[in-house]
């Protein structure tokens, strides 16, 4: 460090000071750092490592510094390098020499491990809340449009009709898995590393469990080397964030497509769209496009952290300073995207007439139902598939729909066709998928009820 030179006689070069300083970004850890320091000081006092009065003075000074930082009055200094030493220097100014006793039985190695675990635990909880809010909005959109039919796609080609609620509940399932991942991530971050020292543990009779209780940790770390070197909890958060952003990006892509004039399935509210600087008629889906774009930066932070960790020997190495900026940006990007998506979906206008018209007339969506019809008449599915494929080819070449064929024309393709072939419709297609997980109205109604129950069971 620039101001802790130890064995050195020369001050650090200015370029080194600037290069190694983390205070420009790790200042946002101040609440976590001070909370950890207060718990540490209180424990030192109770253990008799420092006197109760000394602990009281230190805690008072830390609380005053916290107030100054929150009000923007604390003078952060780059030459003090990081959040820990800025706070310690401020403490020495406030309470004098006794402030130097705060660092007893503690290293910056276990101190930053503590701060990052507290931050990641809080970020996980904030993400859980953001996901739950988004899921509630998505579920309302599905319930409000439970009878709307739209064409389902594979390969972006019209495939089979589905209920819009069924389509939206697919994203609900994705976000449910995301919620579980962040819950798991938060639980794994919930381990208290303070007391591990630089790498070998502290040479004092510490009450680590008391510190853990005060800070709300469920357990203390079991290995001092691992505790100061571990950043798996950050990798897990960034991995979970990457998966969530991928899900949001997929939904964004569909909103972008659905809101085009060519589709017209949905319309974005004016407050969640932008105009063009040159074309006055434009209504651009910039929120969805930016979410799609920001997904890449979240992926990048995960890959950067994996690369940082891949060859680090135990225990602490300065490379770990690189864990912060990527995590901070990941948290900020993810939380902002969850919030803006909630607003975009809450104000989205569904155009059921466009969806239903497309489901009824686009791309021979009932071709599979024709094949299933023949199977019901005794035709093996593979040959039924070929029969209907030839039938669809004929319809395309003549510009006709199945409803326009005479029964005699159906017989040219297969004698198993009977008059009840005309009963095949979008409604019959939906009703036929009446199995758990299917798009039949009854199944979707059950899925909606199950989703409502799942929402009630999610922690706040």
Image (spheres, grey):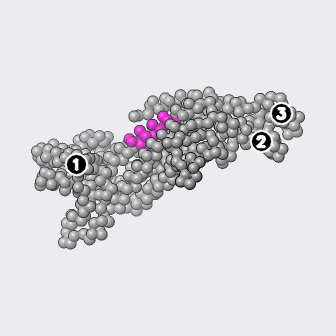
Place of residue 204 in the rendered image (x, y in percent of width and height, measured from the top left): 18, 51
Q: Which residue is mark 3?
A: 417
| Residue placed most toward the observer, 46 or 328 | 328
Q: Which mark is residue 68?
A: 1
- Marks 3 and 2, how far apart in space? 14 Å
Place of residue 255 in the rendered image (x, y in percent of width and height, measured from the top left): 57, 44
Q: Is 356 included in the stretch rendered in magenta? A: no
Image quadrant in which the C terminus is located: top left
Q: Is 135 included in the stretch rendered in magenta? A: yes
Mark 1 or mark 3: name the one nearer the start of the chain. 1
Q: Circle 2: is it few (<14), some (14-19), or many (20+) Cα within 10 Å? A: some
Q: Is residue 199 visible?
A: no
Place of residue 279 in the rendered image (x, y in percent of width and height, measured from the top left): 58, 52
- Please identify the quarter of the rendering in which residue 356 is found: top right
Q: Which residue is mark 2?
A: 385
Left/right of residue 310 with respect to residue 354 in the rendered view: left
The residue sitting at 42% across, 51% down in the picture is 330
Image quadrant in which the N terminus is located: bottom left
| Residue placed most toward the observer, 168 or 345 | 345
Mark 3 or mark 2: name the one nearer the start of the chain. 2
**In the image, residue 344 above or below residue 93:** above
């Amino acid at each position: 460090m620039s101001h802790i030179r130890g064995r050195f006689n020369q001050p650090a070069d200015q370029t080194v000071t600037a290069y190694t300083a983390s205070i420009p970004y790790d200042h946002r850890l101040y609440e976590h750092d001070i909370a950890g320091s207060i718990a540490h000081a209180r424990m030192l006092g109770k253990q008799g490592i420092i006197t109760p009065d000394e602990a009281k003075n230190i805690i008072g000074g830390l609380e005053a510094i916290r107030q100054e930082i929150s009000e923007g009055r604390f003078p952060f200094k780059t030459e003090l390098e990081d959040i820990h030493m800025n706070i310690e220097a401020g403490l020495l100014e406030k309470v004098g020499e006794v402030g130097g006793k705060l660092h007893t039985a503690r290293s910056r190695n276990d101190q930053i491990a503590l701060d990052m675990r507290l931050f990641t635990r809080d970020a996980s909880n904030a993400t859980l809340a953001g996901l739950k809010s988004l899921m509630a909005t998505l579920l309302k959109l599905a319930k409000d449009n439970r009878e709307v039919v739209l064409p389902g796609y594979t390969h972006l080609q019209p495939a089979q009709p589905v209920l819009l609620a069924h389509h939206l509940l697919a994203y609900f399932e994705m976000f449910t898995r995301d919620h579980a991942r962040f819950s798991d991530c938060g639980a794994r971050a919930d381990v208290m590393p303070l007391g591990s020292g630089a790498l070998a543990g502290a040479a004092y009779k510490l009450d680590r469990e008391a510190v853990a209780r005060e800070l709300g940790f469920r357990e203390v770390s079991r290995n001092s080397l691992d505790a100061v070197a571990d950043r798996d909890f950050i990798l897990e958060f960034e991995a979970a964030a990457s998966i969530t952003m991928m899900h949001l990006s997929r939904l964004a892509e569909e909103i972008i497509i659905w809101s085009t004039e060519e589709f017209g399935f949905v319309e974005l509210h004016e407050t969640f769209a932008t105009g063009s600087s040159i074309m006055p008629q434009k209504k651009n889906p910039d929120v969805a496009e930016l979410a799609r774009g920001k997904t890449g930066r979240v992926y990048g932070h995960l890959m950067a952290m994996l690369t940082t960790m891949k060859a680090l020997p135990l225990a602490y190495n300065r490379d770990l300073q690189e864990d912060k900026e990527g995590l901070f940006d990941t948290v900020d990007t993810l939380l902002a995207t969850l919030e803006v998506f909630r607003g975009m979906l809450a104000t989205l206008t569904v155009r059921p007439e466009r969806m239903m018209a497309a489901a009824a007339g686009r791309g021979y969506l009932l071709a599979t139902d024709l094949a299933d019809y023949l199977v019901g008449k005794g035709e093996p599915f593979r040959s039924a598939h070929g029969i209907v494929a030839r039938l669809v080819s004929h319809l395309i070449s003549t510009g006709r729909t199945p409803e326009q064929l005479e029964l005699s024309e159906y017989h040219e393709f297969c004698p198993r066709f009977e008059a009840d072939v005309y009963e095949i419709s979008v409604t019959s297609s939906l009703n036929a998928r009446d199995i758990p997980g299917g798009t039949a109205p009854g199944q979707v109604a059950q899925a909606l009820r199950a989703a409502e129950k799942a929402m009630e069971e999610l922690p706040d």
